[in-house]
Image (tube, rainbow, N blue to C red):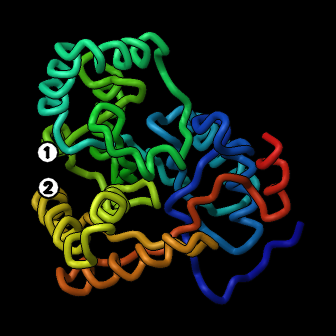
Amino acid sequence: MNRTDSKIKFVGLHAHSVAGSIFDAIGYPQDHMDFAYENGCDALALTDHGNMNGLAYQVLHAKKMQAEGKDFKPIFGCEAYFIPSIEEWQEEYTKAMEDKKRARAVKKDAASGATVEDEGASKKTQDILRRRRHLVLLAQNQTGLNNLFKLVSESYKAENFYRYPRIDYALLKKYNEGIIAASACLGGVYAGNYWENREESPEAVLDAMRDTTKRMVDIFGDRWYAEIQWNNIKEQHELNQFVIQVAQEQGDKLITTADSHYPNPTAWKDRELY
């Protein structure tokens, strides 16, 4: 296929593949990379849910593309599951176990083991035991890649894993060097502020987002990005307005992403069936 010479340069910084986002995305990393290249893109990030299983596919296919004279950069990343404090969560978990009625529900969850991602579920969950938010993490350099590996490994440790592999502010503070972070989607960290406060007032949403921004900037500095997306979901566009306002107030940089879950526009029906 002839390559399209895109007049507007775009790099997808949020994408999912079947290699690491099982039951949520279709297409292997190489399918996504080929489509991006054929449509004038010079790079693409892979940000599968809670793992980096697609990295080897990225590396091998990038080498193949290079051998074919195609200059294309794979960006290594992960869409992590985030909660503010695992220590506080552990305290709440202990309280839940002491409550006989809640304990039965907790044991049922724990017995089920790992859970595949349902993006809709993480958007509205209020119970602290089940709550998690998405956070896009991208390797800036080799140090960042090493720290991404560490964060993913830490997230699967018994003390951090509950239905999903999770990280918190403490782990980000320890392993943030060389990593770019972004606020993600309708299941993301800013979206969590939105879902949890929108019934109270717009100002409550903004205050929560300002607090999240401060904590993220304290860790990442100018490597923190506010992320907006363009889909047909009404709440996404409401969230975008809040994100833009907070970014302008705080002087944070905005990025726009596709949050793609299939390798080309015609594959959406296949994903619906999948």
Question: Which residue is at the front of the view, 171 or 86?
Answer: 86
Percent coordinates x, y for residue 75 in the rendering: 49, 54
* x 19%, y 65%: residue: 208
Residue picked out by circle 2: 219
Q: Which image quarter: residue 78?
A: top left
The image's mark for residue 102 is none
**Is 223 above or below relative to 146?**
below
Query: Of marks 2 and 1, which one's residue comes earlier in the chain?
Result: 1
Percent coordinates x, y for residue 203 in the rendering: 21, 78
Percent coordinates x, y for residue 64 in the rendering: 71, 46
Q: In which quarter of the image is the N terminus?
A: bottom right
Q: Quadrant of the C terminus?
A: top right
* x 34%, y 76%: residue: 243
**Is 77 above or below relative to 51?**
below
**Is 171 above or below relative to 199?**
above
Disc 2 + disc 1, Cβ < 8 Å = yes
Q: Can residue 188 be seen in this view?
A: yes
Question: Which residue is at the front of the view, 4 or 174?
Answer: 174
Q: Which image quarter: residue 98?
A: top left
**Is 192 above or below relative to 206?**
above
Q: Give the class, few, some or many, for how many residues have Cα within 10 Å of label 1's Cα (few <14, many ≥20).
A: some
* x 49%, y 36%: residue: 52
Residue picked out by circle 1: 173
* x 35%, y 13%: residue: 104
Give amino acid for label 1.
Answer: Lys
SS for tag 1? helix
Percent coordinates x, y for residue 23 in the rendering: 67, 36
Please indicate whether residue 74 sits to the left or right of residue 133 in the image: right
SS for tag 2? helix
Please indicate whether residue 10 sits to the left or right of residue 70 in the image: left
Question: Which residue is at the front of the view, 211 or 131?
Answer: 131
